[in-house]
Image (cartoon, rainbow, N blue to C red):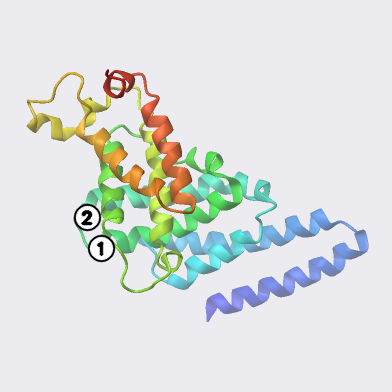
Amino acid sequence: MALEEEKTEMEMAVKDIEEEDDELGSKERVLYKYFLLEWKLVSSLLNDIVSHGRVTDPSSVYTIRSIMDKYQEQGQLLEPYLESIVSPLMLIIRTKTIELGVASKEILEIIKPICIIIYSLVTVCGYKAVIKFFPHQVSDLELAVSLLEKCHNTNSVTSLRQESTGEMEAKCVILLWLSILVLVPFDISTVDTSIANNSNLGELEPAPLVLRIIGFSKDYLSTAGPMRTIAGLLLSKLLTRPDMPKVFMRG
């Protein structure tokens, strides 16, 4: 009820602004003021998500997404707010994955709705503007790979539409996360914990972590839609690393 009242008040305020600014003939001013009013609602919903460490009301996700979608042609209005949206949401994904573990049944329930919000920003502002605010600790690489494998191997049985469950958005967001994590200035084998249990790995053999990334990325390359594009981006970043050619260019 409180959410409905807040939305009604906002709509009335917007109407007043439009009537006032129509006289001035300033479409840009109307749009900017309209956005600022909607941002108050978005900010309130985001604060609730962050304070609880998860989405407690699924309708809030779709309210935020519907507002973001209005600004497909005005992404510059959102850009000053990206850090305040993306950083805390990605922090939830990271910390909850560490706390609960990738094997947890609950982890995907937590990250999917959050990824719907993050991916809506990608569609409005472009991925380059959004991923600047993704966490990029070296230790996150293996974590993100395991999380994407979890998404990759889990299909929702609640809906035939991936978009409505957050599956597609979660895969896209984690693929984008990996596209910056694979740029870590260290040999990937040094952050691959599985190598400690594999003393037979040859000098020219790719690290198991690399093979895991290539494995699911190749699967996404055969699909239609944004996952194929982002998987291609990830592979281009991974395979052009200085330590990759010696592995994949053997005669």
Q: Residue at x 34, y 74 (%)?
A: 158
Q: Position of residue 172 (x, y in %)?
A: 43, 50
Q: Residue at x 32, y 64 (%)?
A: 109
Image quarter of the C terminus: top left
Q: Position of residue 173 (x, y in %)?
A: 42, 49
As measured in the structure, the alpha-carbon distance from the residue carrying label 2 to the one carrying label 1 is: 8 Å
Residue contact between numbered discs 2 and 1, judged by CB atoms under 8 Å: yes
Q: Residue at x 27, y 50 (%)?
A: 149
Amino acid tagged 2: Leu
Say which mark, if any, is on residue 155: none
On the image, numbered disc 1 is attached to which residue?
A: 106
Q: Nearer the viewer, residue 48 or 178?
A: 178
Q: Nearer the viewer, residue 148 or 24?
A: 148
- Give the image quarter of residue 196: top left
Q: Is residue 47 above or below residue 128?
A: below
Q: Position of residue 197 (x, y in %)?
A: 7, 32
On the image, numbered disc 2 is attached to which residue?
A: 100
Amino acid tagged 1: Glu
Does dot 1 land on a helix, a strand or a loop? Answer: loop
